[in-house]
Image (cartoon, rainbow, N blue to C red):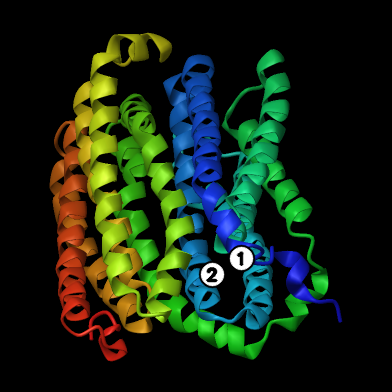
């Protein structure tokens, strides 16, 4: 039987890795942010608002399955992997990679049928578009798995290299699409999906037998955490990523494109904090296992302060440079600034929530609390969106900010109490969130 260590990196020299992890993480995120931004600009300039709106609808489906993948596999993997000894980590990594292969196949089938039979298109859906969207989802999950296994081993250099390969492959595939006039949502998703799957098999050269060797222990341990995270991930997707579908139905493709373009301008920092999660959640798990509670509190508060400052700078830059930005977008986005302000509130609150959630995702009780808070937030979402959809598009974004504020407050109160217990006693029995 082949060992599963080939599926992920070994720990290596941790001190040496720690010196370079920040640099490579920044390069990794900068590269992927630039790639996503360029693709969005290309859609707006070459395809127009209607094609960009179609791209947003497909991207919303990708985000849903990324959330499911994060809930049932990636988040439990980060938690379990961090508290395992080096000798026991191979089996967790093998289960994570094998589970990704299974989930990628299941999600592709469901997305295909969803695109054909469920999505309310203004035009007749076609099988090619549905197939491209399905492949795009599978590729996104495969690409995420490579990056997460690299970050779990504190090896951001490998994550960066996988991102470079992915980006170069996408650019090589997109270039002829632009040249021959074939640049549309279907073809771009097809290229992105193939690129993600290619990166997966090049960087995670495991063996197919892994799927037949899913250990019962791993399955139970992953599901113990993932079942609670799945509820939260689904509700979070509803709260933050159903806006394209609501906007398409109530406002049309023009307004949907406006809302999506405003969000896209702020996405670099959103993606940066996705990298934060990949880097620091495994570390928080290690720190919790060794009772280094003060370190968790310190890095959380520092990250929130830095994040708020960076968002402030980015919004200010968007305001100052808006005439140039509007020109780059094609000159047809004059009313974008109010949407930028609204999205900045949504994303700042989402960033704070993401950082605070890392403290809770170190135990089953923390996952349970996050699941309950997500249900409460869904109730608020349904109320505020039912009102906002009858108002101008900017109010839809304001409604999303209200939901984020509510959920962040719930989580923040729980984390504040937990930190207080840590500070007062420092006993391992007080480690459990919600305890």
Query: Which of the two discs, 2 and 1, labels the residue nearer the N terminus?
Result: 2
Query: Which residue corresponds to mark 1?
Result: 103
Instruction: Verify CB contact (< 8 Å) between mark 2 and mark 1.
Output: yes
Query: Which residue corresponds to mark 2?
Result: 73
Assign a secondary structure to mark 2.
Answer: helix
Between residue 82 and residue 202, name the one nearer to us: 82
User: Quarter holding the N terminus?
Assistant: bottom right
Q: Position of residue 117 (x, y in %)?
A: 53, 51
Q: Quadrant of residue 318?
A: top left
Q: Residue at x 16, y 37 (%)?
A: 395
Q: Residue furthest right?
A: 1
Q: Residues within 10 Å of mark 1 (few under 14, many from 20)?
A: many
Q: In this view of the protein, can residue 335 be seen by the observer?
A: no
Disc 2 versus disc 1: distance between alpha carbons?
A: 9 Å
Position of 312 relative to 346 (above/below): above
Mark linked to residue 41: none
């Amino acid at each position: 039987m082949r060992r599963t260590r080939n599926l992920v990196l070994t720990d290596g020299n941790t001190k040496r890795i720690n010196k370079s992890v920040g640099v490579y993480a920044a390069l990794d995120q900068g590269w992927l942010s630039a790639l996503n931004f360029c693709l969005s600009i290309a859609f707006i300039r070459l395809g127009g608002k209607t094609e960009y709106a179609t791209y947003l609808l497909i991207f919303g489906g990708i985000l849903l399955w990324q959330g499911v993948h994060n809930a049932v596999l990636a988040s439990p993997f980060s938690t379990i992997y961090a508290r395992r000894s080096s000798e026991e980590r191979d089996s967790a990594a093998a289960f994570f990679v094998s589970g990704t292969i299974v989930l990628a196949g299941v999600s592709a089938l469901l997305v295909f049928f969803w695109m054909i039979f469920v999505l309310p298109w203004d035009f007749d859906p076609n099988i090619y578009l549905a197939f491209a969207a399905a492949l795009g989802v599978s590729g996104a999950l495969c690409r995420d798995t490579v990056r997460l296994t690299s970050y779990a081993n504190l090896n951001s250099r490998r994550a960066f290299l996988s991102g470079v390969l992915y980006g170069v492959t996408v650019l090589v595939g997109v270039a002829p699409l632009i040249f021959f006039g074939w640049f549309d949502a279907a073809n771009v998703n097809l290229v992105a999906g193939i690129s993600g799957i290619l990166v997966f098999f090049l960087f995670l050269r495991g063996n197919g037998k892994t799927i037949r060797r899913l250990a019962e222990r791993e399955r139970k341990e992953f599901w113990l955490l993932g079942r609670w995270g799945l509820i939260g991930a689904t509700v979070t997707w509803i709260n933050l990523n159903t806006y394209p579908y609501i906007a398409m139905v109530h406002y049309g493709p023009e307004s949907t494109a406006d809302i999506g373009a405003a969000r896209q301008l702020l996405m670099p920092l959103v993606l940066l904090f996705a990298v934060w999660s990949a880097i620091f959640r495994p570390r928080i798990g290690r720190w919790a296992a060794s009772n280094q509670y003060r370190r968790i509190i310190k890095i959380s508060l520092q990250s929130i302060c830095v994040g708020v400052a960076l968002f402030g700078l980015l919004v200010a830059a968007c305001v100052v440079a808006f005439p140039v930005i509007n020109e780059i977008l094609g000159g047809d986005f004059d009313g974008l600034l109010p949407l930028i302000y609204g999205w900045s509130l949504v994303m700042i609150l989402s960033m704070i929530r993401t950082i605070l959630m890392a403290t809770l995702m170190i135990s089953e009780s923390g996952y349970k609390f996050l699941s309950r808070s997500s249900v409460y937030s869904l109730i608020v979402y349904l109320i505020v969106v039912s009102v906002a959809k009858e108002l101008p598009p900017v109010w839809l974004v304001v409604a999303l900010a209200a939901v984020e504020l509510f959920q962040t407050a719930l989580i923040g109160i729980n984390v504040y109490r937990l930190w207080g217990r840590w500070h007062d006693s420092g006993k391992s029995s007080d480690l459990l969130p919600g305890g």
